[in-house]
Every structure is written in C-alpha cells, then in structure tokens.
Amino acid sequence: MLDRADKKVRVYSGAELRIAEVFAVRGGYKFHDTELSRWGAGFGVIIPMEWLGGSKTELDYAYSPMNAFDSQAHRFSLSFNFGKVQTDRGQFADMREMMAKELEAAELARLNAQQTLEDAEKSRQAAEEARLASEETEKRLKALEAEMTARLEKAKKIAESSEGKIEVRPEEKGNVLMTLRINFDFDKSVIRATEYPTMFKVKEILDTYPEAKVWISGHTDNIGTDEYNMKLSEARMNGVMDFLTRHGIGSNRFFMPVPYGEWKPLTDNNTEPSRFRNRRVEFYLYTGDNQPVVPEGSKIQTVQIVGDSTVSVVGNGRLNYITSFVDNPPRLILKFPNVYIPDPKTIALNQGNFQQARMAYHPNERSTWVVFDLYGRIQQTPNWLSQDNRLMLRLRGDSAAERR
C-alpha cells in the first residue's frame, strides 16, 4: 500500500477464520511502524436474522499491544448488515394469482352492487309507473263512472217522458236494460204514426250510448198459438229495428236479435194490463268495454255438412238439446226444447254417415226435432261441441256404409 502523504510503501497481512458463519477469529501483522504496534488479534460473534430477509448482526472484539506506550488497545464494535429478500418464483406467482382473484372478486362485487342499484332503480321506476298507471286508471274509472251515471240519468228522464211506454233500469257491470211497449194494429208489425214520438225517444236513448252493442228481443202475450206468436214477435221486433236503422241507428249495433213469442212472460196473462206488460221489445245495452253474450236461442236456422263425419246445427242463439238413438233404421234424434222452426224442412246431406236431416216443430212438446237419417250404425259415442250459436256433431258409422 502506498501512503500518499510520505510516499512510502506500507505492508499489511491478516487472516480471518469463520466457523459455521456464527463465530470468527482474526489476526494481523504489519511490517512498518513497529515502534507503535506490530500485531493485533480479535474475534467476532455473528447473529443471523433470516426472518429479516437474511440480515445479520456482528459483535466484534479486537486487541493490539502498544509498545511505545507500554500499553494495549481494545476495540469493540457492533455492525448490522441488511440482507436481500429472497422470493420464490412459484410463491410469487401464487401471490400474483391470489391478488388477481381478489381484484376480480372486488370487481365482481362492484358490478353486483352496481347491478343491485340498477335493479333497485328499475324496481322503483316500475313501482312509480304502476302507481301512476293505477292513479290514471282510477281517475279514468271515476270519470267513466260519472259519465255512465250521467248517461243513465239522462236515459231515465227520457223514459219518464214516454208516458210509461219506455222503461230503463241499470243492470250488472253498468249495462242497461230498456223495455219498449207500443201499440200495433192487430196482426200487424208496422209501427203506427202515433207511436213515432216514442220511437224517437228510443233512438235518443240509444244515441246516449253510441258505442254500446244492443241485444234486442221480441215478446208477446199468450193469445194465439206458439207458432203465431213466434212469428208475430219476430215481425214486430224486426219492424222496430227497421224504424231505428232508417233513422240513423247503425244496423251493426244490433247483436243476434231473438224473438221469444210468449215463452218469456214477465207476469201472467190473466188480465189485459198483464198481457200488455208481456207484449214488449227489450233492448239490452252492453256499455263501456262489456262484450255481448250469446243469448239463448229460439229458432233453428239450418243444418250444414262440415265434413265427412261432422254436421253443424245453426240457431239464432245458444241451443240446448237432448239426444236419442234409433238402430233400425239407424237415426240420431236431437230435441231442442223451446226452440221453433217456421216450417218443416228436409236437407239432403249425402256425405259420410249422414244421409239427410229432417226438421219440424212439435207444438205439444214446445220443441223442435232434428232427425239425422244415417247410412249405418254409430260405432262410437258422438263428439259434441257448442260454439256460440252452433252445435257441432261428429260421429262415425259402419266403414262399409261410409264408403257409399
């Protein structure tokens, strides 16, 4: 070693022995300045701290004699050496994956929370819309109720001015029943001119409910036969409808008109006032959103073949019936109580197992019979389907007969 101050070369030598990286022994010698001190020795204790990233603490002691001073030098030192954190790549990867999963879970939780908030907002908006819709519906219903009440009061006042010839009363669901009683010439259906003011009042009441469908029915007293009264009630009912349509009431407003003759009296027919009460034309007004209901029928209109094994009996309303069978010759008999047909009729069918249909009214039973003459015996129980004013019948007979 060259000392820069005096340009002299100085020589040192030394050695250290470490035992298990825990204990160290060291010594040294110099070849100059022998007057001050020529040699020195010492030892050290090493305290490892693996828990702190491989760091360690060293406690050292050194001794050197001082010849010039006839003394010795003692030195103690404590040093702390920081180590480097050793990481396992696999552990680091696991840690990184764990952190990624935690971030993903946190993001998912955030999205779920956001979705929950959005769903809550949608629910709130839906509830608010439902509340507003309910309030609007309630307002509309109250307004409609008020309007229907006003219309009914107006119709009643018009009826009160008819000298008892028109009656108006409310029915269920806001519908209205109007009853008309006017005088006709004997055995006639033409409306007398003296009854025109009453008829115009009927028109005014119908105009009070311009959107209403109207079911109209005709009725008589019991003077005369069933056939006569059925025809008379139908003719007078048609006369009333004809007058109204000629004076501005649309014909499409009348829904399935039905004449009942004397079959639906309001009271007995023992006195003239009671008979007058039974002679009437009734108007059933379906108001608001109410839809017409198919009424009870009173007349067979026709029989139609629908397919090889299906026929349709068409009436002027809903038909009630009773069935019976005859084997020799094979026939199917349908009885329709309180149902009328003006004249006996035979309709050729000639399809499938159906040969023909014969229809006639039986006054003693107050029923119309429809007899189906068949080509062969019925093999299965017939299938029946009642749809509005139609009765559908499907049956099969002997296979040999059906080929005819």
Image: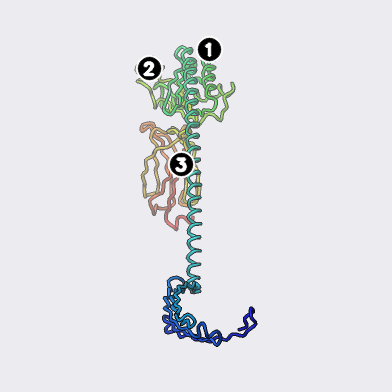
Q: Residue at x 45, y 70 (%)?
A: 52
Three-letter code for the amino acid on which mark 3 is drawn: Gln
**Callout 2 secondary element:** helix
Residue 342, horizontal then vertical, whole percent: 47, 32
> Which numbered disc flags the more N-terminal residue, 3 or 2?
2
Badge 1 or badge 3: first in the primary sequence: 1
Does dot 1 land on a helix, a strand or a loop?
helix
On residue 194, the disc is 1
Q: CA distance from mark 2 to mark 1?
A: 23 Å
| Sooner in the amino-acid sequence: mark 2 or mark 1 | 1
Number of the front mark, 3 or 2:
3
**Which circle, 1 or 3, is nearer the viewer?**
3
18 lies above or below 88 = below
Nearest the viewer among 214 and 46 is 46
Residue that numbered label 3 is attached to: 387
Question: In which quadrant of the rendered view does residue 276 lie?
Answer: top left
6 or 9: which is nearer to us?
6
Please state the horizontal and vertical placement of residue 302, each as a whole percent of the image.
Answer: 49, 39
The N terminus - image quarter: bottom right
**Where residue 343 sits: x, y (%)?**
47, 33
Task: Name the amino acid type tagged 1.
Answer: Thr
Residue drawn at x 48%, y 31% is 135
Q: Residue at label 2?
A: 274
Q: Marks 3 and 2, Cα distance to the nearest angstrom?
A: 37 Å
| Cα distance between the residues tagged 1 and 3 | 42 Å
